[in-house]
Each structure stands twice: as structure tokens, then as C-alpha cells.
Image: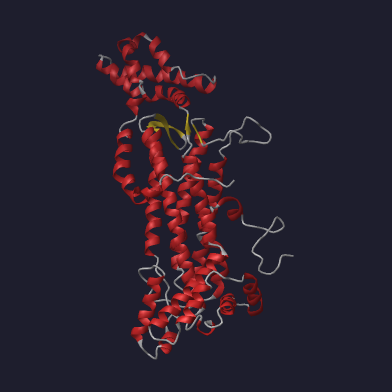
Amino acid sequence: MAAVGDSESGPESYRSPLASRYASLEMCFLFSDRYKFQTWRQLWLWLAEAEQTLGLPITDEQIQEMKANLNNIDFQMAAEEEKRLRHDVMAHVHTFGHCCPKAAGIIHLGATSCYVGDNTDLIILRNAFDLLLPKLARVISRLADFAKERADLPTLGFTHFQPAQLTTVGKRCCLWIQDLCVDLQNLKRVRDELRFRGVKGTTGTQASFLQLFEGDHQKVEQLDKMVTEKAGFKRAFIITGQTYTRKVDIEVLSVLASLGASVHKICTDIRLLANLKEMEEPFEKQQIGSSAMPYKRNPMRSERCCSLARHLMGLIMDPLQTASVQWFERTLDDSANRRICLAEAFLTADTIVNTLQNISEGLVVYPKVIERRIRQELPFMATENIIMAMVKAGGSRQDCHEKIRVLSQQAAAVVKQEGGDNDLIERIQADAYFSPIHSQLEHLLDPSSFIGRAPQQVHRFLEEEVYPLLKPYGNVMEVKAELSL
């Protein structure tokens, strides 16, 4: 059996694949015990410093002792204390006090557990957004480069996954980019709207601090403001119960779930295009697609993104239900659930964004395959243009329509019943009725004449909407994505 408080787990113990296989080290660290409990100690220090500044009898020696032991955490002792006390915060109060004997009596002075618990969560959420935002911006940047390079490469569009009018590879990519830009803006908005819980006491009334400062309301407000500023927040909640409102967690997981939906859609498109052999995600030289079928080139990165995105989207139910059952000023049935869903949401989002960046940096396009598929479908799409050309050459619209209808059905039968290629154009070329426009057929079948304003839309979209949105993240754009597994 592992010792109590042993933070290392080997192959005999379950570890979340999010941490052991997928998420980045920096995101995992944010949700680690070490970062959490270091932040608790930092919050206790900030509280003591502010209380001292406002006149409470706290000495410089006590402050210095706390500063010197912020990272000196005896996790073994904390685990044993929690097992004895059945209270995680008091276990760490005692553990901190053990290495700060002079300051032990003023640690956590006037505070409740949520002073460290909730405020730490808010700090972690903010910092997790700060890690995620530039990563998402990099994905958008990579896809923008891809879209710009292929802005005018015609490809068959699909509605209902049935052949539709032509678009371009770059324009289709802009559909992906647009969704991710919405996500980037939403993540930034929720990050910037985060407020500190602050110094509020057991039921949010600040009664304990009002008592400490002998009824001086101004000092209590100053205390709240000072600690909020030390934590790097611009605002704190004026109204809280024991906790900050759990509606905040809904907002946080909502934008992360929405990001999951975007990534799922993008990677599903890539998987479908891989099946059509028009596009592939990166495939490494020694990568194995199948243990049984050596020729396989499976889109495993895109499949991983879809798999994890489903998990991310499903996590939104946790904060929704938690917020709905918080009785009065607080119930503790939020705690265990939040330990899981908040961390898993960010670790999952981190994983799918890292993986999507890796995909977007190595997307492979096969123009010849795309061209062949266009040739299979374009003759049917071009029939209206052919009819108009015949009318301009002096033909009857109705006679031409009937001729085209008959030839189209014959060509469709070849494709569907015989498995042959679409030979509509060959039939038109062989029919003397269409001789007035035979010389125009090549021009009438030029794919670039069927893509509308797609190239212009791509360039305008990138210049007016995407690049300005990415500008604040310019200094981190060169970082390459690395996958752990």
C-alpha cells in the first residue's frame, strides 16, 4: 500500500489519462496539489499582510516566517492531519503552522475555508484561461495560413454530405476558423469577467472581520480590496454566500464545452475528408495505423479530439446541477464534484487544442483527388451554364433543356448502375445539336468559374476579422505543438 499522502502513483494505481497521457505539463501543474496548496499559503500571507497594514497586531517576524515557508509543504503531515481532522483546510492550517510556529496563531485569522478554497479556484481558473487562450490563438493562426494558401483551390462542397456547389479548400477552412474565433472571444470574455471572492467570512457578511476591526466598516472594505489587488483581480464580488456563486462555474464550463463542439465539428470534417482521400492529418514515418492492416492511415489525432471533445461537452451538466442544488448560503455537495469537473474541463480543453494545433501544422491536401471528384460532379452542375450558352448561340431553351435531361439521365445511369465515370460531357461533345458551343465547353467547365466569391471572402475575413483578433497573441505564435502520446 502507498503511504498516506504519497503523491506518486505507479502502474498499480489508477491515474487519469488526462494527466498521464494527454494534457500539457503546465496545465497539469496548475491543477496539482502543490500549486493549490502553495496558493492557499500565498492567500494566508496576503491576508496577514493586509491585516497588519490595517492595524492588527501581526509582527514583521511573523510575516517573514510565512514568506519563508510558502513552498515548504509537508504533504505527508497534511494528509495525516486531514485523516485525523476530516477537514482539508484545517489540516493545512496546522501543517503551515508547524513550520511557522511564530505565525501559527495568526494564520487564517478571521477567514473561513472558502477564503482559500474559492479564491484559489478563481486564481487557477484565471491562470488556466491564460494558458489556453494563446494556444487557441495559435491554432487559429495555423488554420489561417492554411486557408490563405488555398483560398482559390476549388473543391466540391457538401450539404447533407451530398455533392453540392463548389467552394474552395480555404473557404471551408474559414468555416472552422470562424467557430474558433467565437470560442476565443468567449474564453477571453469569461476570463476577463472573473471576479475574486475576496474576504467575506463564513456566510458572506464579513462579520468576523468587522469584529476584528472593532466595527470599522471602512477597514473591512479596505482589507477586501487590498487582498483582491494582491491576487491580481480588478474586482471582487460584493455579494457572496459562503462561496462565490456557482453560476461562475457554469459560465466557465459553457465556453469550454462550446470550444469542444467546435473542435469536434472540425475534426469530424477532417475524418470525412480523410475517407474521401482529399485531406489527411499528419502521419509520422514510423506511425502504425492498424495492428492488423498495415496499409491503414487512420486519422487518430482527429479521432482523439472527437473522443475528448464529447467528454468536455458532457461536463457542463456538473456545474449546472451543482448551482441548482446549492441551498441558501452553501452546501458542501459542490466540493467533490468541482474537484473533478473543473480540472477535467481545462485538462481536456488543453489536450484537444494542443492536438488540433499539431493537426493544423501538418494538414496534407491532395489536389488531384479533389480535381477528380470535381470532374465527376461538375458536368451536372454545369448544365445550366450549357443551356444559357446554347440560347446565346441561337438555340431554344426548352429544346436544349430536354436534350440535357436525357443525356444527364444516361450519364447518371453509367455512374450509378455500371460504376463508370460521369460521361455527360463526352455525350454532349458527341451530339451534333450542341456543336455551336463545343468550343466553349472547356471554359464552361472551368471549376474556378463555379466558386463564386469564395477567394475574396477568405481574404477579407482573414484581414478584417481574424488577424486583428490574433494581434494580442503575436509573441507566442511561433511555438510548435508537442504531443505526449
Is 243 positioned to the left or the right of 433 in the image?
A: right
Using the rendered image of the protein, determine whether residue 104 is visible from the camera's viewpoint. Answer: yes
Viewer-side residue, 167 vs 299: 299
- What colour scheme does the image use? secondary structure
Residue for point 43% across, 49% down: 136
Is 181 positioned to the left or the right of 395 in the image?
A: right
Above or below, 431 relative to 385: above
Q: Residue furthest right?
A: 1
Q: How many labels does the image show?
A: 0
* Residue 82 coordinates in the image, percent (x, y): 63, 76
Q: Which residue lies furthest to the top in this view?
A: 432
Using the rendered image of the protein, determine whether residue 314 is visible from the camera's viewpoint. Answer: no
Above or below, 447 relative to 129: above
Residue for point 43% across, 78% down: 49
Q: Quadrant of residue 88?
A: bottom right
Above or below, 160 relative to 391: below
* Residue 220 coordinates in the image, percent (x, y): 38, 83
Is 87 positioned to the left or the right of 272 in the image?
A: right
Residue for point 48% across, 39% down: 269
Residue for point 45% across, 67% down: 122
Q: In which quarter of the image is residue 214?
A: bottom left
Viewer-side residue, 421 vs 92: 92
Viewer-side residue, 72 vs 151: 72
* Residue 226 coordinates in the image, percent (x, y): 37, 76
Quadrant (top left/top right/bottom left/bottom right) for the N terminus: bottom right
* Residue 303 coordinates in the image, percent (x, y): 56, 43
